Image: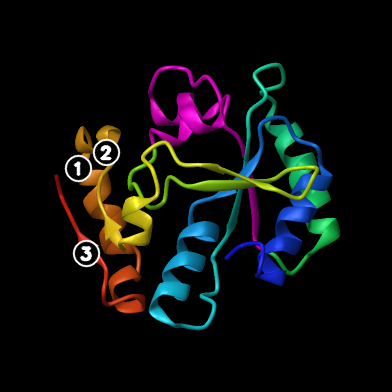
Amino acid sequence: MILQDAWSLAILQIARSLQLPDWAIGAGFVRALVWDHLSGQKRTELSDIDVLYFDPENLAKETEKAYEKALFEHRADIPWSLKNQARMHHKNATRAYHNTEDAMQFWLETPTAVAVRLERDDTLTILAPFGLEDLFQMIIRPTPAALEKMDQFESRLRSKPWIDQWPSLTIVRE
């Protein structure tokens, strides 16, 4: 789906141009594309494009902002959001992460914990610590980390228009 979607491919090419360590684009970028395709809907407008990378040698927020600025210089019309996953464990009050995919294990929903990287040879690498089954079966399920903070999972469900957007979604709370 991604390789056949010119818009998604262009976004990945821009992110790849930064040559970030252990980078990928995840969350709604992948989730919405798949759910729109499965539902036969037009592209959902995204509130942000989550660019992830992992650089434990440089945890400065200023570096993130500089990378984000470079993304906006490529495409100012894209709602870029760039975060170094090597520092996000502080925000999430968890153990330190080992890499980008490891950080994604602490996200709240399994279909959101999917990301993609466009390699130099134009192949895709998929990061999916919980697999792709829930994403393609349109199931919203808490990750193991979310099971320990179901209030946050439930709050996120209430704040997102997912059921309105994709009525065939199933929510599993275990």
* Mark 1 vs 3: CB contact within 8 A: no
Query: In the rendered image of this protein, does residue 81 appear above or below residue 100?
Result: below
- Where residue 66 sits, quadrant-wise, is top right
Q: Is residue 94 left or right of residue 6?
A: left
Q: Earlier in the sequence, mark 1 or mark 3?
A: 1
Q: Please tell me whether mark 3 or mark 2 is closer to you in this view.
A: 3
Q: Badge 1: few (under 14), some or many (20 or more) residues near its Cα, within 10 Å?
A: some
Cα distance, mark 1 to mark 2?
A: 6 Å
* Residue sitting at x 76%, y 63%: 10
Q: Is 100 situated above or below 113?
A: above
What residue span does the magenta drawing correspond to? 79-106
Q: Provide the residue designation for mark 1.
A: 150
Q: Secondary structure at mark 2?
A: helix
Residue type marked 3 = Thr
Say whether residue 121 is left or right of residue 152: right
Magenta run includes residue 76: no
What whole-number distance in Å separates the C-alpha atoms at marks 3 and 2? 17 Å
